[in-house]
Image (cartoon, rainbow, N blue to C red):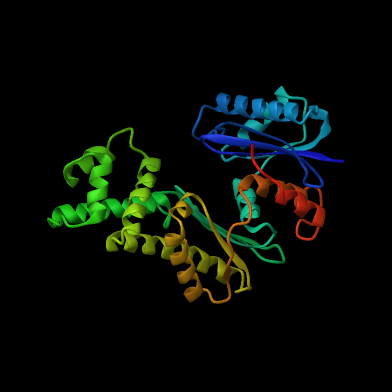
Amino acid sequence: MRNFLVCDGGGTKTDFLIFNEKAEILSYYKNAGTNALFIDEEKAINNVIEGINECIEKARLSINDLELVCLFIPGFENCIHKIKKRISMKNIKCLSDVNNAFFGAMGKSYGIVVLSGTGSFAVGISKDNRKVVSGGWGPLIGDKGSGYHIGIMCLEKLAYFYDNDIKDSKLRKIFLEKFGIEDEYKIREIVYSSDFGREDIAKISKIVAEAAKENDKDAIDILRRAAKELVELVITLNRKLNYEKLPVSLIGGVTNIGDLFINIFKEELSVKCKNLYYENPKYDPLIGATLYVLLKEANIDIERDKEVLNNLSKYRRD
C-alpha cells in the first residue's frame, strides 16, 4: 500500500496529513506558518521539517514508508533543495496552493473556483483539462472582490461621510465603535501607520458584514459591488473555456460573512453566466491536496472509486 504526505501551508498555520492510496487517513498534525514570503525562511523550513517528522511519528511510520511528500505552500519553492538536504526523503515536491484549493472546493478535476480572502483570484479547469486563471494581481492592481477590496471600499465610504457631514449610518457607527474613535478624521492616523497593513484593511470586511446584517444599505452595496467583481473573474474564465457547462464554487475568508454574501454572488452568477451553476465547496484545502495527489500522482479515479470516497467522508481533524 502506497503512503503519501501532503501539507497545506500559509503564513500563520500549516496542516500535515498522511494517507494511503485508498484515502485512509493515517495521521494529522498542525504546526505554525510556513509561507516564506511572510516569515523567516529558516523558520519556515524548520516548521516544515518538524511537521513532516511529527506526522510520520503519529502514523507510526518511517520516512522510507512514504512514496511522496507534496507541499502546497506559497513562497516555498526556493526552500525545497534545503529540505532535501536535511531529511533523507528525496521525492518532495512543492506545488501551487491554487491546486489544492481547487480540488478541495470541487472534489473533482473540473470546474471554476473563486477565492476571496485577503486577495482574490479565480481558476477554471475544463473537462478536457484546459486550465485558465484570472485575478490574483495583488492589492495595487487587482484583488477586486477580496476582503482587502471590501475594506478599501468601506474606508472610501467613511471618508465620503466625513467630507459630507453624514452621521446617520450604521456602518459609520459600528466602525467608530470598533476602532474606539470619535469621528472619521482619525482614520488617516490609523490606516497610514506603519503597523497597519493589507491584512488589517481586509479585516474591516467584518465590520461591513456586521453592518450589512443590520440592513445598512451602504454596507450591502459594498458587498454587492465586491460580489460583482468576483463574478467578473468568472465571466473571463467562462469565455476562455468556451462557455462549457461547469460548476462554480466560492471559497476563502470572505465567505465567512455567510449566506448574505454568498447569495449575492450566486444571484449575480445566475444572471451573468447562465451556463454555469453554483456548488457549495466540498472539502477543505488539505483534503484538496489529498485528492490532487491521488489523481495526479497515484492515478486513482477520485470521482468513481467508492472506497476512496467513503474514506474521505470519514475525515475529521483532531
Near-viewer residue (268 or 40): 268
The picture places residue 158, in percent across and down from the top left corner, at 23, 52
Position above or below: 300 against 9: below
Position above or below: 226 against 239: above
Quadrant in which the C terminus appears: top right
Residue shown at 76% from the left, 54% from the top: 309
Residue shown at 52% from the left, 65% from the top: 234
Position above or below: 100 against 231: above
Please identify the residue farthest to the left as the structure is shown.
165
The picture places residue 299, in percent across and down from the top left corner, at 81, 52
Number of on-image labels:
0
Position above or below: 315 against 262: above
Give residue 6's quadrant in the image. Answer: top right
Tell me if I can see residue 95 in this picture: yes
The picture places residue 217, in percent across and down from the top left corner, at 28, 63
Quadrant in which the N terminus appears: top right
Is residue 150 left or right of 22 when viewed as pictured? left
Is residue 22 left or right of 16 when viewed as pictured? right
Residue shown at 80% from the left, 29% from the top: 61
Please identify the residue farthest to the right as the structure is shown.
1
Give residue 25's quadrant in the image. Answer: top right
Near-viewer residue (253 or 316): 316
Tell me if I can see residue 35 in this picture: no
